[in-house]
Amino acid sequence: MQTPQNGTAAHRAPAMTALSGNEIYCMHLKGYVPLGICIGNSIQSMGFLGSLGSSFNNALGGEIDQVTRTIHDGRVAAFARLVEEAKREGASGVVGVSSDLRNLASNTEFLFVGTAVTGPNGNPDGQPFTSAGDAQELYCHMDAGYMPLHFVFGNIAYSIGLGGNLLASLRTLMRGEVREYSDMFNATRHLALSRLCDHARQCGANAVVGIRTHMGTITGAHEMYMTGTAAFHRGLAPHPHGEPVTSDLTGEELWSLASMGYMPIKQLIATSVYSLGAVGQLTAMFKGLKRGEIPELTSLVYEARENVFDRMQRDASAIGAEKVVGIKTHIVELGQNLIEILAVGTAVKRVPGIGVATPNLPAQAIIRDKNTWMSSIWDIGVLNS
């Protein structure tokens, strides 16, 4: 990042920012102005890990520890460089931090990018905050009392494995849930969330907001990667086990709930893997030759969703939640006549004395700026040719 070192305002170099007009306005309302773009990267050779990930596909499955740690360490190195760059420029914080992986020949680049901002209090302790949310989401978080501390992440690299495939193949002869797969998928998703929470605790946070989940493959393994903003809220009571509250709600949703006196308790994740069964598969195949409903598939997917919702409801009751909001469901075909149903939501409850700083959100915190560059290209037909 390059920012002015000295001279009058008229002679200073212009600030370079990835913030949109609405984002700049939102930061202005909180007393922050952009300084410049910060970048942190680390290019690493994955070496033997590629063959290691592939070899685990022939084992029993589960987490591949060495791949998890190597990917995590690469992100840590890249993120540390982004923070150091922000420190050198005296930034109060870095907004809209994004994380990416790029393949460079046989190597992998771990990349973090964000926009440095400075505020009315400067950076007295030399440690800028970092936020996973863009400036519009950050405005909503701050207005609802969540003061940003640190961009946090947790990951897990895992393999289903040949052993799991053989077991599942036997189970697919029967219709219903394949508990071995359900248990493994539930374990991997909750382990990634647990590691994100551990990172937040190290930062002194009592909340992680704006959690986003990313799924992909790297070095022959599947990876689940979760990111969020570790924050501190004065109105949150300490968790009995020292765990921060977690939420995947958008900034606008979190602000709206806070205005009604609701606070998040925990992000809930539930998943089930189901098999149609050999007999059901043949029946559905023949019925698929003509138009109309396929009752076997309809009832299977309905049952799978109900099972996931029941699990989520039990988890919410166990932690004293009043509601589970923002529930999103996903269905994924895993092959071998298997499907996964995944549900994610945030458990909330009313907390006395909770509110927001301003009675209404400004339009600039809600309206997303149009991507004019891509629109222009599509308009002139360059990408259509």
Image (tube, rainbow, N blue to C red):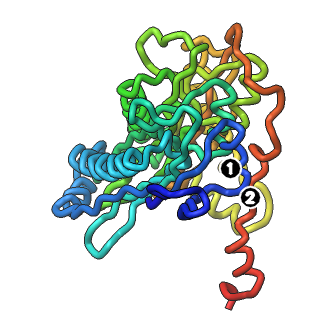
Q: Answer left or right for 366 relative to 234.
A: right
Name the residue rendered at 44%, 19% in the picture.
243
Q: Is residue 380 visible?
A: yes
Q: Position of residue 35 (x, y in %)?
A: 54, 52
The residue pinned by badge 1 equals 23
**In the rendered image of this protein, does residue 130 appear above or below residue 18?**
above
CA gap between label 1 and label 2 equals: 9 Å
SS state under label 1: helix
Q: Nearer the viewer, residue 372 or 163?
A: 372
Q: Residue furthest front?
A: 8
Determine contact: label 1, label 2, CB under 8 Å: yes
Residue 54, compared with residue 193, is above or below; it is: below
Q: Amino acid at mark 2?
A: Asp
Q: Residues within 10 Å of mark 1 (few under 14, many from 20)?
A: many
Crowding near pointer 2: few (<14 within 10 Å), some, many (20+)? few
- Which amino acid lies under the numbered mark 1 shown in the image of this protein? Glu
With 194 as the anchor, is 370 left or right in this view? right
Q: Quadrant of residue 326?
A: top right
* Residue tagged 2: 369
Residue at 39% across, 66% down: 102
